Image (spheres, grey):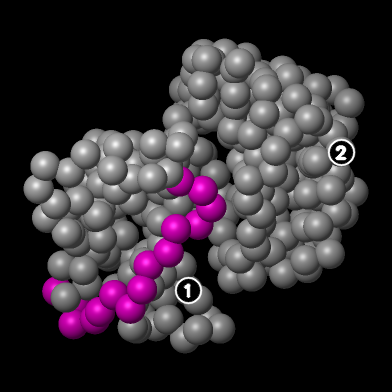
């Protein structure tokens, strides 16, 4: 049976009642299994993860996008995370008996339906991108170009013409819809409030800055905790494992006389990503992953 994971991100991380309504709409929208739902008040963002058969995931995602458009006003939204709309991103990830190319078709189908029925502009990214410049979302939707700037550019700049939907924004903004492999959202906290240090560490870690391959990184100011965060996406954990990212972040922090106080995984991740770290730090010799009870049960 083909299974797909869908991980929509919504621009609401402070009002749990609104997130609960979106989750409820997703569960009613399609025959899916909810795996995780979490909110980040600093980013003002919710990440919801569910799994199911391809068409059911498309239905559930559509229902979530519709409900978010009804409940979230982007003109009132503020948060550390870059965003285009009430539903900011909707990626489809192949799990079993389905290819990435088939997930691209799902993304295109959802984008077209949202543009047509909800009148929300949609942009295809990742493996689903029709415009090469939109393949890497972090380069297309940046800190200096997000919802506020898109409102002005969408009707005048050809670079921001949507793949589907109108060339204007309502309070729901626009949606980025794509297909990709597993991505791990990984954040590291530093014992300083100096954003310049966090920016420099992020620049040195990310691949575009000459750092680790498959790493996208930026800096976030976590005012409520009085510290800064290096926020990362690991787009291929098999090639660039978490422990390698953590070690490099610690070394970079030491250069500036600061420390890593903690790190966090945001959302879901494959168990092998954690086992990679366990084998490395525990220096396990001749370890067979079939020794892990959960792996045997699976």
Structural crowding at the residue carrying mark 1, measured as other residues with C-alpha within 10 Å and reported as few (<14), some (14–19) or many (≥20): many
Give the magenta part as a residue range. 255-269
Q: Residue at x 60, y 23 (%)?
A: 3
Dot 1 corresponds to which residue?
Answer: 221
- N-terminal label among 1 and 2: 2
Dot 2 corresponds to which residue?
Answer: 28
Of helix, strand and loop, which one carries label 1?
Answer: strand
Q: Quadrant of the N terminus?
A: top right
Give the image quarter of residue 30: top right
Q: Residue at x 25, y 60 (%)?
A: 246
- For the question of whether residue 171 can be seen, the reply is no
Using residue 165 as the reference point, say whether residue 213 is left or right of it: left
Foreground mark, 1 or 2, reads: 2
Residue 21 is situated, as x and y percent measured from the top left of the image, at 85, 54
* Nearer to me, 244 or 253: 244
- 266 magenta-colored: yes
Distance from the alpha carbon under mark 1 to that under mark 2: 36 Å
């Amino acid at each position: 049976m083909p299974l797909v994971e869908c991980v929509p991100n919504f621009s609401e991380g402070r009002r749990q009642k609104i997130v609960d309504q979106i989750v409820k709409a997703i569960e009613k929208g399609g025959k899916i299994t909810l795996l995780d739902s979490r909110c980040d008040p600093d980013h003002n963002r919710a990440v919801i993860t569910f799994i199911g058969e391809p068409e059911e995931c498309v239905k559930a995602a559509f229902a979530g996008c519709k409900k978010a458009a009804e409940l979230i006003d982007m003109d009132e939204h503020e948060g550390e995370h870059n965003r285009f709309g009430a539903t900011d991103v909707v990626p489809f990830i192949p799990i079993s008996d389905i290819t990435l190319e088939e997930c691209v078709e799902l993304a295109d189908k959802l984008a077209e339906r949202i543009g047509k029925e909800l009148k929300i502009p949609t942009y295809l990214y990742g493996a689903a991108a029709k415009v090469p410049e939109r393949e890497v979302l972090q380069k297309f939707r940046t800190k200096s170009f997000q919802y506020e700037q898109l409102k002005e550019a969408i009707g005048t700049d050809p670079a921001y013409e949507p793949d589907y939907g109108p060339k204007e924004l309502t309070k729901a903004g626009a949606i980025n819809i794509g297909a990709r492999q597993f991505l791990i959202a990984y954040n590291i906290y530093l014992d300083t409030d100096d954003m310049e240090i966090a920016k420099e560490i992020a620049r040195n870690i990310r691949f575009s800055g000459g750092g680790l391959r498959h790493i996208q990184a930026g800096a976030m100011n976590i005012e409520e905790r009085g510290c800064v965060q290096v926020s990362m996406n690991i787009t291929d954990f098999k090639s660039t494992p978490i422990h390698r990212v953590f070690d490099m972040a610690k070394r970079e922090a030491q250069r500036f006389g600061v420390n890593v106080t903690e790190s966090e995984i945001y959302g879901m991740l494959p168990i092998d990503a954690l086992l990679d770290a366990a084998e490395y730090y525990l220096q396990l010799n001749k370890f067979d992953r079939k020794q892990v009870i959960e792996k045997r049960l699976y």
